[in-house]
Amino acid sequence: MVGLLTINLSDFNINPEEIRYILENYEQKKKYYRLKTGEFIDLEKSREIKFIESLITGMEIKTSQIEETGEITVPVYRAMYLNELLKQIKGTQIKKNKEFKDLVEKLDKENVEEIEIPKSMENTLRFYQKTGFKWLKVLDNYKFGGILADDMGLGKTIQILSLIMDYVENYEESGEIIEGQEQILPTRRKSSLVICPSSLTLNWQNEARKFTSKLKTTVIRGNAEERKRQIEKLEDYDVVITSYDLLKRDIDVYKEKDYTFRYVIADEAQYLKNSTTQNAKSIKEIKADTRYALTGTPIENSLSELWSIFDFIMPGYLFSYRRFKNTFEAPIVKDQDEKAMEKLKALIQPFVLRRTKEEVLKELPEKSVTILTSEMKEDQEQLYLSYLAQAKQEIAEELKIDKTTFKNNQIKILAALTRLRQICCHPSLFIKDYEDGSSKLDQCMELITDATDGGHKILLFSSYTSMFEIIEKELEERKIKYFKLTGSTKVDERMEIVDEFNENKDVKVFLISLKAGGTGLNLTGADVVIHYDPWWNLSAENQATDRAYRIGQQNNVQVYKLITKNTIEEKIYEIQKRKAELIDNMLDTQTVFANKLTKEDILSLFN
């Protein structure tokens, strides 16, 4: 790896041979260290020592290297991290070569004006989308990967399509392809690969056709033989689109093809959050010049998800997972270590672009969130208390034994929590012949009736598709027309019913499974969103809300969260709020930092 900047520690007036011992004392939080010269270093106030320690821990530099050479050589992709550290020691003179200065200047998100927008996209992109394109382009110039983490609905797809379009236009202008003639050069224009959830493959193709007339696209689909034939001809297309599920089935075909794509794009990159899954392993085997991840939630449940995404876009940048966990994840999550948080943020900041709707879409109407509570009916409450007592008896003691027992009994814990949540929604979800009804259902139907009578259209989300069967009966009794989308809804059908819902004024309600319909849908025809039951992860709820609250929304959006009083639902909501506070400013946004439930969280749910 090419060094970009060499730092000579003689500028710090510190003998390189003493670095190891100085840092040992620094890590032990000692106040002073006596040099061989007899002078003392104030370890608490020395900006130079803090700088060297941050360099070593943030770049995997060995003290033995410093002792031998008296220098620190920084690799290219650490340039921005180094620049952040240099700001902390302004009183010390550090020589920066021209290449370093140019790179830092170009990677600055605010300083990319010299990059030209593709001619065909100049009048299509919004101002912040142009900034996003330029940022992607700068990273690509240095073959750095990046995470485009804009809010849902801000047009991550079109920003990536613009990047691909720029490559195509520049390739044509270079003289390698002349219309109506054979290629002058033997090289061929490279294809780009988009991997996304299966429900979004056709959406990507539709967006490409809508905004970029030149791009030739194909969606990998069909049986294994049909897909193999498509993959063998992928050079015929500018954009090849496949799903995470099909990629892991077809990975051997791609490897046999041994093709290097121009770009590989992981859409809804939270699908890569678990580095041990086949989704993550397969996509990391695909060769590409540059890799990008698109996700509004790069951190959903834990910092390990961020590591896994970085392991795709720039393998090794955040070190091995073991080191990442010990250096960043454990200190940040367990100890709220601000020092570790600052280091990690400095490392990831140059390669994550995050904009919120509030920042860039001043024309968007208001969004209001209302928490509506209800008290359980008598029979419903008795059932809840009975199951709660049973769960406490079965689980509480096991949780107190040790961590191993806690982990081994997660399935039992989840089952108990699920039962309690289902009773809050409607006991008949698992109890046959239950007849007393549900106070939450009554509240929900009253809300739907009032909203539809007022001319509003509603998105209703639930994590239980079986709850829809109960709601559907209520809607049919009231002669309220509705659509439903769950995991069993076919990909082709999804787009049809989405378009019809937005256009057909007679269809008032859209029932959507939180997991199946929380992403990739444009439902600006609705201006009321109801979350029937709270989900552990607030970001999943926010993503679902963003189906309506996005570009194209003309009306104020009202969001209702239905919570049953004195139940597990209130506790889930409290956990959501508490975890959200742990975000700090890791991504300079309100991205949810909802860590996995701890042992203490579990115990609190049963109290």
Image (cartoon, grey):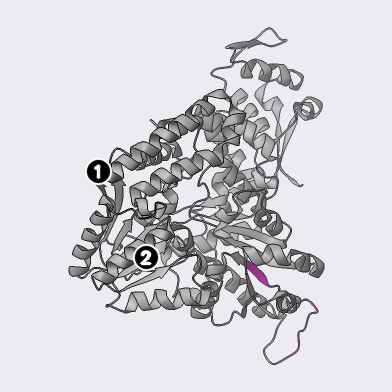
Question: Which of disc 2 and disc 1 is earlier in sequence?
Answer: 1
Q: Residue 209 versus residue 143: which sits nearer the camera?
A: 209
- Mark 1 to mark 2 CA distance (whole Å): 28 Å
Q: Viewer-nearest of labels 1 and 2?
A: 1
Would residue 315 be found to the left or right of residue 117 on screen? right
Magenta segment, which residues?
181-194
Whether residue 441 appears in this view of the structure is yes
Residue type at the position of mark 2: Leu
Magenta segment's dominant SS is loop
Query: Along the horizontal axis of the image, is 276 left or right of 586?
Result: right
At horizontal 49% and vertical 79% (from top left) the residue drawn is 210
Residue 585 rendering spot, x and y as whole percentages: 45, 40
Instruction: Report if the CB atoms under discs 1 and 2 are less than 8 Å apart.
Output: no
Amino acid identity at mark 1? Glu
Quickly name the residue at label 2: 511
Q: Is residue 540 above or below residue 83?
A: below
In the image, residue 268 above or below residue 378: below
Element type where label 2 sits in the image: strand
